[in-house]
Image (cartoon, rainbow, N blue to C red):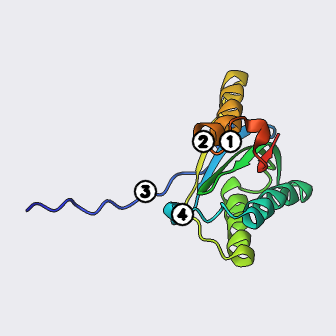
Amino acid sequence: MNALPFAQRKMLPHQVPSWVGQGARHFVTINARDRAAEPFAAPAVAGVLLENLRAYETLGKWHIWVAVIMPDHLHFIATFNLDDAIHQTVTAWKRYQTRTLTIQFQRDYFEHRLRNEDEFVEKMTYIRENPVRKQLVKSSADYPYIIG
């Protein structure tokens, strides 16, 4: 029997090119380590994750355009304060959630700079409709763990 080779997850690059200035919008996805366990599904956890996204906004780390907390992952679009590295900001936010909520995230996260208004609208719609696509609610307006 041929065994499949062990596939190690690659580290994603998170360096922002020097030509990207303040004000750029980024689409971010963060996954739970054990997605099958749906660790963000508990209302107390989902609510605190949303509050903590807003808290980082208050601290001037990012501006949240839209965000959704799903049972096993979260998505958001943010404009980051580029005086701090995006990777450091997201990593620090995840570390705080792990300490305070005792939840575990996958090692890395996905981040993509939105290059134009069309991409922004497309990703915003994707985020807002995620609970509907996953059949958690019939209308995104009924989902309690959304910003924007």
- Alpha-carbon neighbours of circle 3 within 10 Å: few (<14), some, or many (≥20)? few
Circle 2 residue: 135
- Dot 1 falls on a residue whose secondary structure is loop
Mark sitting earlier along the chain (1/3): 3
Q: Residue furthest front?
A: 138
Q: Pointer 4: what residue?
A: 106
SS of the residue at dot 2? loop
For the point 54% across and 63% down, which residue is it?
106
Residue corresponding to mark 3 = 10
The answer for how far apart the CA atoms under marks 2 and 1 are is 5 Å
Among the two numbered marks 1 and 4 on one chain, the one whose residue lies closer to the N terminus: 4
Q: Residue type at mark 2: give it.
A: Gln
Q: Earlier in the sequence, mark 3 or mark 2?
A: 3
Q: Quadrant of the N terminus?
A: bottom left
Comes first in the chain, label 4 or label 2: 4
Q: Is residue 100 visible?
A: yes
Residue 102 picture location, percent across and down: 67, 77
Which element type, helix, strand or loop, lies under badge 4? loop
Q: Which residue is mark 1?
A: 137
Sequence-first tag of 3 and 4: 3
Direction from residue 112 to residue 116 in the image, left or right: right
Q: Are marks 4 and 2 in contact (CB under 8 Å)?
A: no
| Image point (73%, 23%), residue name | 117
